[in-house]
Every structure is written in structure tokens, then in C-alpha cells.
Image (tube, coloured by chain):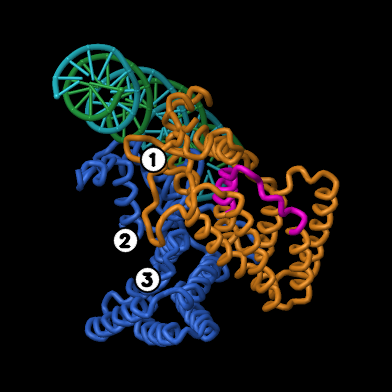
Chain colours: A orange, B blue, C green, D cyan
Amino acid sequence: MSGADQKRALPRNTYSKATEDVLRDMILNGDIEPGERLNEVALASELEISRGPLREAVRRLTGEGLLTAVSHRGAFVRTFSRREIVELYELRSALELHAVRLVCTRASDEELDAADAMLSDTQSRISAAEAPGYPQELDFHLRLVELTHNRALHRAAVEVHRQLSLARSMSAKRPTRARAAVVEHSDLVAVLRAREVDRATALMTRHLDHSMESAIAALGLPGDGEGPHGETPIPLEQSPS
Amino acid sequence: MSGADQKRALPRNTYSKATEDVLRDMILNGDIEPGERLNEVALASELEISRGPLREAVRRLTGEGLLTAVSHRGAFVRTFSRREIVELYELRSALELHAVRLVCTRASDEELDAADAMLSDTQSRISAAEAPGYPQELDFHLRLVELTHNRALHRAAVEVHRQLSLARSMSAKRPTRARAAVVEHSDLVAVLRAREVDRATALMTRHLDHSMESAIAALGLPGDGEGPHGETPIPLEQSPS
DNA sequence: GAACTGAAAACTGTCAACAGTTCTCAGGAA
DNA sequence: TTCCTGAGAACTGTTGACAGTTTTCAGTTC
């Protein structure tokens, strides 16, 4: 047979997998706030499934660093100390700087042209609306990592970006570096196009430093979070007011 | 009270969490072979638990890249194509090269001395027995990443190392680069001690290249695995003979 | 009023049974 | 023999109930 397995191509979605995606969206959308506890029975009935598949999804998202589980107390939407955010940015640097090096020697001219085109498209949309601003920022970086054609690297980058996205949702005021960021992206693509590795990594380093400073500044509240090598505090729900 | 929460410090282990650790060990030890399917009812009864906690553990290990789950067919111990191994090594390079840069500017002299001491200890043990050989290799690299005091980076490195460890267990013949590796580690520590960043990253790059070549060579079988951007094959169990 | 006590409520961890899908393999047709 | 067929077996996905832990809070004592 030629068009062999039509059925196999569309695997019947299981509740467990679907719930995982829904939950992730809810967390990243802010439908559940950082620090908040997930009530299994309430959530399960809201999603109209039983607790089994829900718990499996929770376990998976815990592994992704979006939730933190505490024995016999439940799963909490993860919160980030200032230090943890710095750590995540360092991890992001590790991934994206290496991506820059790989892309510089590996991506085709056409691919880089496409990236450039995407950028100017984004730029025009930002000049016009300004509204969303940041999603594109992350999008560009993930697109860049995709150009390495390394799926393991890409998956790792996606995970870090998701965590940073969640961390960002803890900020009261949103950092509006969108316009500046696009310019920096543009410069980067130009240098990549010229295959100047050292200059490209230098640009990326500075760009990520800016991004981190902006994120940390927007965070404000938790001071330094903890000592230089302190322990992460238990993510208890903080319900002030 | 001074020694406040004794109970809280030792969280009653849940079957789910314990199973996760046991299963991971079983996979990395080779008790379950790469490509093999995990039979939920059989495994659950063997571990003397019910399928619920087992399934949660499986979901978690799937997230760690040690298992691959297929809808309605079960979870399989992951197998790696040649390309996936190369990708993992690139990811490992990203993490460890950045770790080298951070350690160079951040680790104390004392910490680096300790790393050096550990090395010569390992060296003597290898000269004496030669037997285990590789675990130390990975240990050193993880120890190095620990010196960054970046937990996110460390966690990512651990995950990659576990996957590579599993991939290595697919090899018929084991690569015996142990002695050569220790020498390269020694050189690296010396350069780190001298805070020569560029030379350190160069050494690490070469070292990882050697390690990858050795791993790929030991693998042998699956040729190139797949085309340049091909799809990962379904991890069906390959029961020859 | 502030701090302790303990029983009830709420919730997570675990289990056993049911439902739907995939796999196996004997039986039959070409 | 080789290829199909389909009924039964085996297995995964899901559910609802039970068990043990944590939290809550009214009642009590200082």
C-alpha cells in the first residue's frame, strides 16, 4: 500500500496528554497564578475528567519546571526567586550562544534571509500595535535555535523559555523592550549572514544581558531572594491583602 | 524550638516518587533493555504497587527523555539514532562550554583544587582496576558543572548525561577512553586554575569531540540512522535472534 | 486576648475494576 | 504456501472509591 497508515498518523488523543497541554496553557496564560495550589478534585471536575489523567499531566509539568510538587500537600504553580531567574538566563545563554555558533556555520543563506524577513514583519507589527510585544521576542530566539536543526537543543530551549515566560508573569510591570529588542535581533541576523561567529556571539551575549536586566528590573519585589547559595523556599501560596 | 520541623524535613516517601527513582535505575542499569516495552501490569506487580503510581513515574521519566510513550501501545525504553546522539553531544557542549566559562571566572581556587584532588584519586583508581572506567568520566563533568553553583544548568546537564548514559548502553563494545579522558580532565583543570578562559573552552571542545567520536564509533550498527532532517522512527522493540 | 488542643473537613496517595484499543493467532480463501 | 479475516487475549486509558495525611477551626486554658 502506498498511503499506508492513515489511522496511525492521527493518534487518538488521550485525556492525559490533552490535559497536559491545557494545563500548560492555563499556567502560562496566568489562569492559575504563580504560587497558587492546584486543587485536584476541583481542577478535575472543571476539566471534566477524573483525577488519574490530571495527576499524570501534573507530574509531567512538574518535570518541565512549571509546577513544584510537595508530598501530601499538592502541586503549586512555580515561583522564581531572583537568583533562579539569573540561573535560567545563564542556562538560556548557554543554549543560545551555542545555537548562534552552530547557525553561523550551518544555516543556509535562504534560512537566514527568511529569519530576516520574519523580523521586519514583526517590526512593522510592533510599530503599528505595540500591544503584545514580548511573545515575538521569544519567538525569534526559538526560531533561531530551530535553525540549528538540533531537536534536542530546541526542546531544551523551549523549556527554558517557558519557565522564563512564567517567571515574567510574576512581574507587576511588564518590560517594554520590544522595539529595542527587534533592532538587536536585526543586527544579529546581519552578522550571522556575514558568518562572523565571534561578533555574533558577542551581540547575543549583550542582547541577553539586556533582556535579563530588564526582566530583573521589572520583577522588583523579592530583593535578592536568598543568600548566595541559599535554599529555595517552599512555594507556599502567598495570599496577601 | 531550635531544631524545628524534624518531620517536615523527612517527607514520607510516596510510592510514586520512589518508583520513579527505582525505574530510572532499572533503565540506566540495563535491567530493561533499550527498545523494550514496559508492561504496566507486570512491572506494577513486580514492584508491588498498583498501576497508578507506576504510570505517574513513567510519565515523569518520559519527560526526562528516558522513555518514549506511544498512545495505547505503552512506554518504551528510549533508543537513539546516530543523529540523536550527535544532537545530544551538541547540547552537552552548549551546557559544558558555558559551564567552563562560568567556572573560570567564578569558582574559588579551593574548589578547583578539590576538583584536581578528586581527579588524581580517580586516576589512581583507574590505573589500579580499570574496571568501571566510564562512570567517573561523567562524574567529573557533572562536578564541573556544579562548580558554577547554577542549579538550573546542573539539572539540565544531569538530564543530558543520563540520556547519553542510556545511549551508551546500546553499544555492543564499550569505549575505553578512560585513561585518555582523565589526562584531558587534568589539563582542563590546570587551565581553569590559571583562569585562561579561551584555552579552557578550546580544551573542553576537543575533549567532547573525542568523547563523541568514541561513543559513535562504539555504537557501530545503525549507520547514519536517518536522513539529514528525517523523522525519528517509532521505537519498536527490536528482538533479533 | 493569645496560645494550645483535638476532632472534623478537605485533600492527596493508592487501589481495584471497567472500557476501549491493540495485538495474537487459529482458521479459511486464493 | 501466502495472504486475509476476525474472535479472543492482552494491554493501556480512565474512573470511582478507600486510606492516610494535612489543614481548619471551634472550644478551652492560661
Q: Secondary structure at mark 3?
A: helix
Start-end of magenta stretch: A161-180
- When the figure is inspected, residue A96 is found, relative to residue A59, above or below; the finding is below
Q: Secondary structure at mark 1?
A: helix
Please name the amino acid that badge 2 sits on: Asn
Task: Please give the residue where the numbered disc 3 appears in the rendered image.
Answer: B143
Residue B228 spot, x, y in % from top left: 65, 66
Residue C5 spot, x, y in % from top left: 16, 24
- On residue B55, the disc is 1
Q: Quadrant of residue D29?
A: top left
Q: Depth check: give the residue in front, B107 or A152.
A: B107
Can you tell which of label 2 and label 3 is closer to the viewer? Answer: 3
Q: Depth check: give the residue in front, A140 or A179.
A: A179
Q: Image point 67% across, 78% down: which residue? A: A198
Label 1 – label 3 distance at C-alpha: 32 Å
Can you tell which of label 1 and label 3 is closer to the viewer? Answer: 3
Residue B184 spot, x, y in % from top left: 42, 85
- When the figure is inspected, residue A50 is found, relative to residue A70, above or below; the finding is above
Q: Quadrant of the N terminus of chain B?
A: top left
Query: Within the magenta stretch, is there residue A207?
Result: no
Please name the amino acid that badge 3 sits on: Arg
Q: Image point 41% across, 39% down: which residue? A: A236
Q: Does A125 sit left or right of B12 as displayed?
A: right
